[in-house]
Image (tube, helix red, strand yellow):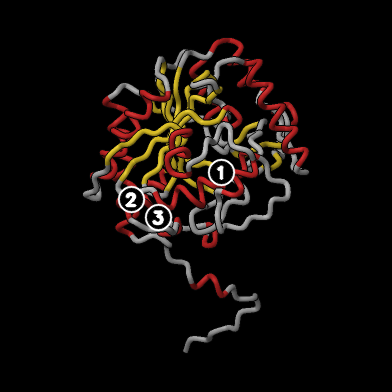
C-alpha cells in the first residue's frame, strides 16, 4: 500500500505550465537558422568570437536599461558590481582595435524593463563587423543573410532603401530635420500622447512607431538610412543636403525592426562626449548612469579601423519567419516561464 503525504509547502500553480512556450518544430527551426548564420560567415571569412557577458561598465544609452549584479569574490578581481551586456558591441570593437579583422558573435544579451508581446529581458543577438565597409555596403550583406534565412520557410522579400528624411517627406509630408515640435505632434493625427518630458527625437520616434511602421509592406525589407544627427548613437556623422546626418541604418521586415547598424565612430574624444551627454539625459530623468567603458575608449584612442557593424535580433527574425507577434512563440521558455 502506498501512502501519499500532503505537501507542507505552498504549491505554485504556475508550475503546471512547465512546457516550452515554443513548439518543438520552432526549436528545430532556430537550430537551422543558427547553422545558416555560421555557414554564411564561414563562407565569407568572418571569424566567430565570444566576448564577456559581464562587464565593469554598462550601456549609457538613455533608452536602454541594464541589469547589474555583485561579484562576491576577492576584490583583486576588480569592481564588485558588474553589468550584464545589452550587446557585445564594446568588446567586439576592442577586438577590432587589436587587429582581429572581420568578426561576429551570436549570443544572449539582456535588457531590463523590456518584457511583453515583442520583448523578453534576455534575447539572442547576432552582431558583426566588416573592416573597410560603410553602412550602405553592410545593408547589402544584411539583405543577403536574411534572404538565406527566410528561404528556410519558403519566403522571399525585396530590399528597398530609403533615407530617413525621404521617408518622412514622402509618407508624412514633413521634413524631419527641420519641422517644429508642434508640426511633429500634429502629424500624429488622432494618436494622443502625454507631451510631458518629450523632446524632438521622442516625437520622431512616435511617428515611426505609430504612423510609419504599421504601414510597412509585409514582404518588403526596408533599410532606412542616414538618421538625424541627434540619433547618432555610435555612428559617424556627415553633411547631406545642408544638414548633418548619422551614418546609421535600421532594417525592417514589414512592421518588425530587425537590425540596427552603423558606419562606426572611431573618435575616442567624440565617443566620450556622447557617453557624457547620455549621462546628462539619464540624470535629467532620475535614472542611474552606469560607469563609462574606459577599455573601449582606450581601444578607440589606440585606433579602430574604418568599419561598419550591425546588430540583428534573432528572436525578432524568427517571429517574422513564423508570422507571429508573440516573442514567447520562438523561445524555449519566455521570461514568465524561466
What percent of the width, then of the height, locates residue 257?
44, 44
- Of mark 1 and mark 2, the one earlier in the sequence is 1
The one of 46 and 192 positioned closer to us in this rendering: 192
Q: Can residue 153 be seen in this view?
A: yes
Query: Which mark lies nearer to you, 2 or 3?
Result: 2
Disc 3 and disc 1 in contact, CB within 8 angstroms: no
Q: Can residue 94 be seen in this view?
A: no
Report whether 76 appears left or right of 326: right
Which of the 4 quarters of the picture holds residue 38?
top left
Circle 3 crowding by C-alpha within 10 Å: few under 14, some 14–19, many from 20: many
Residue at position x 63%, y 41% in the image: 63
Between marks 3 and 1, how big is the CA–CA gap? Answer: 27 Å
- Of mark 2 and mark 3, the one earlier in the sequence is 2
Element assignment for label 1: helix
Residue at position x 43%, y 44% in the image: 171
Relative height, residue 20 to residue 318 (above, below): below
Element assignment for label 2: loop
Which of the 4 quarters of the picture holds residue 244?
top right
Please give the label number shown on residue 54: none
Element assignment for label 3: helix
Q: Read off the residue under disc 3.
A: 330
Report whether 46 appears left or right of 73: left
Between marks 1 and 2, how big is the CA–CA gap? Answer: 20 Å
Circle 1 crowding by C-alpha within 10 Å: few under 14, some 14–19, many from 20: few
Residue, far top: 302
Residue at position x 52%, y 18% in the image: 238
What percent of the width, then of the height, locates residue 301?
61, 12
Q: Read off the residue under disc 2.
A: 218
Q: Read off the residue under disc 1.
A: 205
Report whether 330 appears left or right of 6: left
Amino acid at each position: 500500500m502506498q501512502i501519499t503525504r500532503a505537501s507542507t509547502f505552498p504549491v505554485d500553480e504556475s508550475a503546471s505550465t512547465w512546457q516550452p512556450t515554443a513548439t518543438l518544430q520552432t526549436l528545430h527551426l532556430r537550430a537551422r537558422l543558427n547553422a545558416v548564420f555560421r555557414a554564411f560567415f564561414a563562407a565569407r571569412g568572418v571569424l566567430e568570437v565570444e566576448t564577456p557577458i559581464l562587464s565593469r561598465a554598462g550601456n549609457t544609452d538613455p533608452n536602454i536599461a541594464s541589469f547589474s549584479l555583485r561579484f562576491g569574490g576577492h576584490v583583486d578581481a576588480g569592481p564588485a558590481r558588474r553589468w550584464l551586456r545589452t550587446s557585445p558591441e564594446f568588446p567586439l570593437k576592442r577586438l577590432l582595435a587589436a587587429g582581429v579583422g572581420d568578426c561576429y558573435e551570436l549570443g544572449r544579451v539582456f535588457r531590463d524593463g523590456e518584457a511583453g508581446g515583442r520583448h523578453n529581458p534576455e534575447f539572442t543577438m547576432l552582431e558583426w563587423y566588416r573592416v573597410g565597409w560603410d553602412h550602405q555596403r553592410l545593408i547589402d550583406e544584411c539583405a543577403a543573410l536574411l534572404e538565406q534565412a527566410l528561404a528556410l520557410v519558403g519566403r522571399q522579400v525585396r530590399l528597398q532603401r530609403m533615407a530617413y528624411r525621404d521617408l518622412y517627406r514622402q509618407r508624412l509630408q514633413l521634413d524631419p530635420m527641420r519641422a517644429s515640435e508642434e508640426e511633429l505632434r500634429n502629424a500624429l493625427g488622432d494618436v494622443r500622447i502625454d507631451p510631458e518630458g518629450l523632446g524632438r527625437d521622442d516625437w520622431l520616434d512616435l511617428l515611426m512607431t505609430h504612423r510609419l511602421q504599421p504601414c510597412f509592406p509585409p514582404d518588403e525589407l526596408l533599410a532606412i538610412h542616414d538618421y538625424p544627427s541627434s540619433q547618432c548613437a555610435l555612428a559617424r556623422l556627415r553633411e547631406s543636403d545642408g544638414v548633418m546626418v548619422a551614418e546609421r541604418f535600421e532594417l525592417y521586415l514589414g512592421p518588425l525592426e530587425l537590425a540596427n547598424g552603423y558606419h562606426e565612430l572611431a573618435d575616442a574624444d567624440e565617443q566620450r562626449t556622447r557617453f557624457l551627454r547620455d549621462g546628462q539625459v539619464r540624470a535629467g530623468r532620475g535614472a542611474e548612469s552606469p560607469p563609462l567603458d574606459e577599455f573601449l575608449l582606450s581601444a578607440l584612442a589606440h585606433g579602430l579601423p574604418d568599419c561598419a557593424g550591425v546588430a540583428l535580433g534573432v528572436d525578432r527574425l524568427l517571429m517574422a519567419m513564423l508570422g507571429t507577434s508573440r516573442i514567447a512563440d520562438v523561445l524555449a521558455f519566455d521570461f514568465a516561464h524561466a
